[in-house]
Amino acid sequence: MGKLEKVIVENGITYVLGEDDIYYPDLQLPEGTNYNIGKFGHMRCEYLKEFKHGYYMELLLDGRLNEYLHDIDEECHEMLDRIVEQMKVKQGVTEQLKAENQMLWVGKMNNIIACAEEIVVREVVLK
């Protein structure tokens, strides 16, 4: 692997010469915005790429995409937690049920989590 050559052009953008002799922009995330993106953030990213490509490119080129996806992921997890707690109360899923009938509790919790995730995806990720 050879040394990467950097070239700065008039508009202030730094380009890197790749191994294929093509110059690529040397894009980096702004300081402090290198967040880990979870399941819902990745789902939102794929949705933006496919259905809102212009907005996706705007966020990407402005260096705000990673922070935006992190915020969406956080919002989704908060909403998921709220919905799961509300559904547990409505369906009577308690610690007592967990102690008395573990398999019933697991089945109900799996159903609640699946339903809550579907709500979060429809309300936040696909909007």
Image (cartoon, grey):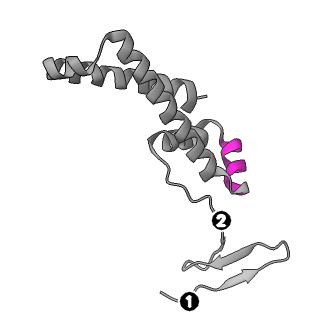
Q: Earlier in the sequence, mark 1 or mark 2?
A: 1
Residue 90, position in %: x, y? Answer: 38, 10
Residue nearest the viewer, comparing 17 with 70: 70
| Helix, strand or loop for the magenta stretch, by majority | helix
Judged from this view, the residue extending furthest toward the front is 96
53 vs 19, left or right, is right
Identify the residue at image location x=29%, y=16%.
Answer: 93
Residue 78, position in %: x, y? Answer: 50, 33
User: Hey, which quadrant is residue 12 in on the image?
Assistant: bottom right
* Location of residue 11 with respect to 2 vertically, above or below: above
User: Hey, which quadrant is residue 110 in on the image?
Assistant: top left
**Mark 1 or mark 2, whichever is nearer to me:** 2
Q: Which residue is mark 2?
A: 31
Q: What amino acid is found at the position of numbered circle 2 in the picture?
A: Glu
91 vs 68, left or right, is left
- Mark 1 secondary-structure assignment: loop
- Mark 2 secondary-structure assignment: loop
Distance in Å between CA atoms under marks 1 and 2: 26 Å
Residue 43, position in %: x, y? Answer: 49, 39
Q: Which residue is mark 1?
A: 3
Magenta segment boundaries in residue numbering: 53-61
The answer to the question of whether label 1 and label 2 lie on touching residues, with beta carbons closer than 8 A, is: no
Residue 92, position in %: x, y? Answer: 31, 11
Asked whether residue 7 is in view, the answer is yes
Question: Callout 1: 10 Å neighbours few (<14), some, many (20+)?
Answer: few
Quarter of the image that includes the C terminus: top right
Question: Callout 2: 10 Å neighbours few (<14), some, many (20+)?
Answer: few
Task: Check residue 61 in the rendering and tell me which mark sits there, or answer none.
Answer: none
* Location of residue 80 with respect to 52 vertically, above or below: above
Q: What amino acid is found at the position of numbered circle 1 in the picture?
A: Lys
